[in-house]
Image (cartoon, rainbow, N blue to C red):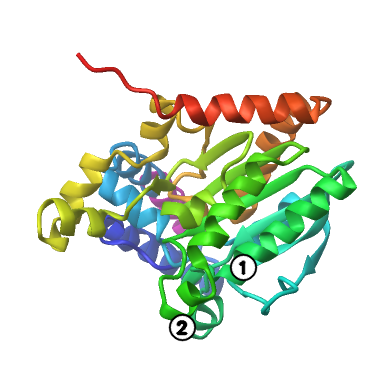
Amino acid sequence: MRYLDFERPIATLEEELERLKAQYEAEQDETLLSRIRDLEKEVKKLRYEIFSKLSRWQKVQLARHPDRPKPLDLIPHICEDFIELHGDRLFGDDAAVVAGLAKVEEYGVVVVGIQKGRDTEENLKRNFGMAHPEGYRKAMRLFDLADKLNLPVLTLVDTPGAYPGIGAEERGQFSAIAHSIKRMLNLRVPSIAFITGEGGSGGALALAAADRVYMLEYAVYSVISPEGAASILFKDASKNREAAEALKITADDLYEFGIIDGVVKEPLGGAHRDPKLTALRIKRVFLKALKELKGKSPRTLRMRRFQKYVKMGKWMEV
């Protein structure tokens, strides 16, 4: 288990707890059980105290936690019979985007997710969760398949943003993102998106222009990172904490603004503490939303999507 700075008090207690449990396993000393139970209660209480008053910057840190569950960690607990499909049929296969067909209970679904790596080797393979144009074109190929087979779409988004490299720009990164957004908005089938970690800029929006958009409790969703905003607003990237507060990019903020449709509660301590429970909560919300959207005509779905996103551009001057 890897701990963030603000979790150090929890880490100290949990390390002591693990030591006591190992000692009990070795010695079978019944007198240790009482101490273990007391320490477990103390850990739970401390975790609740810390996580009940997290700052926005601390939530950004949780959204970026290296152990945070990725789509390939969540999909097996959300779906059955997942078959991954590869390639955009134009250039190549982008490992940052995982996509395929699956079942969620009795429903066939198309699943698309952005996959970060767990270590340096996998992050290089997955390009740190930053998709290339071929990744978005792969997603659009799956959206076409969803319409053709009349299957709902489930997307799982965790990306700092689309890859900004020269090669990606030469292959039409801006166009791929724009067309992916347009393709989602024109889907004839229900679409449900979950921001599971970072929802960075157009790279996230390309897979989140859905009928329903939900965020995990400690996920963030923004047009720019706190570091990028600090560089522009304060001319100092180190002022990321202040920028995070100003941006209001957390799930609670965006639900209050009406940008997202709901917040999925995470296990105490974050999604990485119990990826399976996190996935089952996503599954429950997905099924509820799908039942509400299923049966709507393609025309109704498109009209409601148009109204949903146009409404976000309204403002009032006083």
Please indicate, yes or no, whether residue 305 appears anywhere in the rendered image: yes
Residue 40 forms part of the magenta stretch: yes
Dot 1 falls on a residue whose secondary structure is: helix
**For this view, does 26 lie left or right of residue 58?**
right
Magenta span of residues: 30-42
Amino acid type of disc 2? Thr
Rounded to the nearest whole Å, what is the CA distance between mark 1 and mark 2? 20 Å
Q: Which residue is mark 2?
A: 120
Of the two numbered discs 1 and 2 in the rendering, the one whose residue sits closer to the viewer? 1
Q: Residues within 10 Å of mark 1 (few under 14, many from 20)?
A: many
- In the rendered image of this protein, does residue 281 appear above or below residue 313? below
Q: Are marks 1 and 2 in contact (CB under 8 Å)?
A: no
**For this view, does 104 lie left or right of residue 21?**
right
Measured as percent of width and height from the top left, residue 130 is found at: 48, 68
- In the rendered image of this protein, does residue 14 appear above or below residue 188? below
Amino acid type of disc 1? Gly
Rendered residue at 72%/74% (across/down): 87
Dot 2 falls on a residue whose secondary structure is: helix
Q: Residues within 10 Å of mark 2 (few under 14, many from 20)?
A: few
Q: Which tag, 1 or 2, sits closer to the chain's start?
A: 2
The quadrant the N terminus occupies is: bottom left
Rendered residue at 43%/49% (across/down): 269
**For this view, does 164 lie left or right of residue 131?**
left
Q: Which quadrant of the structure image shows residue 54? A: top left
Q: Which residue is mark 1?
A: 135
Please, what is the dominant secondary structure of the magenta stretch?
Answer: helix
Rendered residue at 36%/46% (across/down): 47
Please indicate, yes or no, whether residue 281 appears anywhere in the rendered image: no
Measured as percent of width and height from the top left, residue 111 is found at: 73, 54
- In the rendered image of this protein, does residue 106 appear above or below residue 20? above
Measured as percent of width and height from the top left, residue 133 is found at: 57, 69
**Which one is in front, 47 or 297?**
297
